[in-house]
Image (cartoon, rainbow, N blue to C red):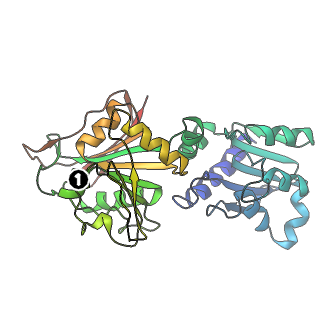
Amino acid sequence: MRLKDESYMRRCFDLARLSAGLNAPNPRVGAVVVYQDKIIGEGYHQQYGGPHAEVQAIRNVSNKDKQFLDKSTIYVSLEPCFHTGKTPPCVDLILKHKIPRVVVSCVDPFEQVAGRSIAKLRAQGVSVTEGLLQKEGAWLCRRFFTTVQKKRPYILLKFAQSKDGFIGSHDQEITISNPLSKRLVHKWRSESTAILVGTTTAVVDNPQLNNRYFFGASPLRLVLDKSLRIPEDAYLLNGPKTTWVFTEHPKQSNRSNLQYIPLSFDAHLLRSMLEYLQQQKIQSLMVEGGGQLLQSFIDADLWDEARILTSNTTLKQGVKAPVLSNHKIHQVQSIADNQLTVFLRQ
């Protein structure tokens, strides 16, 4: 039974991954309805404000199979919601259809859920199995869990470095990663709620910070610009995607996609910005540069994951790559002539 349960839960994980970048600030969740070892319905939380995974899975049960719901098992990668938000509680939907068994990977740490749905199901006689493939389920929901438990966005640091440890030049843009790596970076952008750079990167590299080479959405663009040094014609301040500029000299913008946000550039800069992002329900933040900004996050121990692309090229001089501390290696992968190393903060 456990092997079959794990197989169906992994299907929930596969479904949940389909929503990457689309359902924040809600978690990624997948659900599968099984009757006599056959999947009769499945679904995932496709978009913020839309039906949850359990709703989609039950809706997708065909009319001829609806009669079997009261004899089925529903597998869910995260505890069903208990409260009314943009949608009604999923726990009540499960009870309405008299589904007798529920298998859950992770308990939802959100204070309005936090085991209440599991308790309600058991009180109504439903058999509940919790903690199945919990480690994998928690990894899938790590962005959501971070916002709930740490009261800040999940922070992903990303940079590309040369073989000899430089990330670029002081006065011009230099391409380090290969085309496959660049496409992968744009996939990461599609999965992030927001993306951040500092003033120097914005001025020297003039990045667009959007998703051009992968499917899906582009992140909200953020930039730290204390004295408003970024030129008016910079990509970051133009185009259809919204940009927030954190500055000590806010001004009124006549562009609908551009907002200046006052912020003191003092010792509390990063934490003040993260507090603001949490208030705005920004679930995940991808920090792309430059070196000083990345190192500031590392020194403040304000990061969760770092993805570093290392090329075979040598620069011999330039901007030194940031130095990680308090970390462990999670993954190492070759991408053509680049190497991707993923670190997790311990």
Residue 225: x, y in percent?
29, 51
| Residue 257 in view | yes
Between 260 and 314, which is closer to the camera in this rendering? Answer: 260
As drawn, 285 above or below 87: above
Asked whether, in this view, residue 75 is left or right of residue 171, the answer is: right
Between 313 and 291, which is closer to the camera in this rendering?
A: 291
Residue that appears at 64% across and 53% down: 29
Could you say where residue 264 lies in the image, as x and y percent from the top left? 36, 41
- Label 1 belongs to which residue? 201
- Residue 181, image quadrant: bottom left
What is the total number of numbered labels drawn onto the structure image?
1
Task: Estimate the x, y position of residue 134 in percent, counting from the top left.
Answer: 63, 38
Amino acid type for the residue under numbered disc 1: Thr
Q: Quadrant for the C terminus, please.
A: top left
Q: Quadrant of the N terminus?
A: top right
Q: Residues within 10 Å of mark 1 (few under 14, many from 20)?
A: many
For the view shown, which residue lies furthest in the left direction? 316
**For residue 119, above or below residue 195:** above
What residue do we see at 16% from left, 57% from top?
173
- Above or below — where is 211 with respect to 273? below
Q: Considering depth in this image, is 38 or 144 the residue closer to the camera?
A: 144
Q: Percent from the top left, x then y, of residue 276?
A: 48, 46
The residue that appears at 52% across and 49% down in the rendered structure is 283
Answer whether residue 41 is visible to the viewer in this image: no
